[in-house]
Image: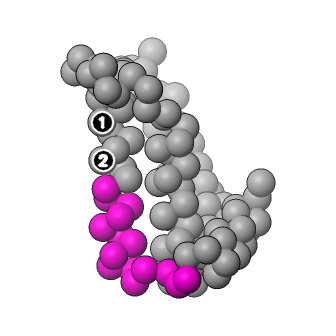
Amino acid sequence: MELSKTQKVVDEWIKQYGVRYFNELTNTAILMEEVGELARIMSRRYGEQSEKESDKNLDLGDEMADVLFVLVCIANQTGVDLEDAFKKNMKKKTNRDHSRHIENEKLK
């Protein structure tokens, strides 16, 4: 799904089921909460922390989708076209880092 389509799907869901968007500050706090839940899985499943039994059934993809959903909500309510922003960001990264990582001895 294209990001513009994703933004439309989220907006339609909010209008049908969510009543309205939470305000921008509330959504930012929710985003941080969702990122924390994702970080918990990552640190325990792929990092050095041991995974608790209660964490083993947590769905990594679902937590990533939660982060994406709230990020899309924030983009929608602040008028950011994520597809355009992502394309510009990739161009910026390419221009800035076109040889940086290739020449990094730490990555070889």
Residue 46 falls in image quadrant: top left
Residue 8 falls in image quadrant: bottom right
Q: In the drawing, what numbered circle is on residue 40? A: 1
Which residue position is annotated with label 2?
36
Q: Nearer the viewer, residue 105 or 83?
A: 83
Mark 1 packing: few (<14 Cα in 10 Å), some, or many (20+)? some
Q: Residue drawn 66% across and 71% down? A: 13
> In this view, which residue lies farthest toward the left?
49
Percent position (x, y) of residue 12?
Answer: 70, 76
Percent position (x, y) of residue 90?
Answer: 60, 54
Magenta residue span: 19-33
Q: Residue drawn 50% across and 81% down? A: 21
Would you say the magenta stretch is mainly helix, strand or loop? helix
Please, what is the three-letter code of the amino acid marked with disc 2? Gly
Query: Does residue 18 show up?
Result: yes
Percent position (x, y) of residue 49?
Answer: 22, 21
Pointer 1 and pointer 2: residues touching (CB < 8 Å)? yes
Q: Is residue 26 magenta?
A: yes
Mark 2 packing: few (<14 Cα in 10 Å), some, or many (20+)? some
Please, what is the three-letter code of the amino acid marked with disc 1? Arg
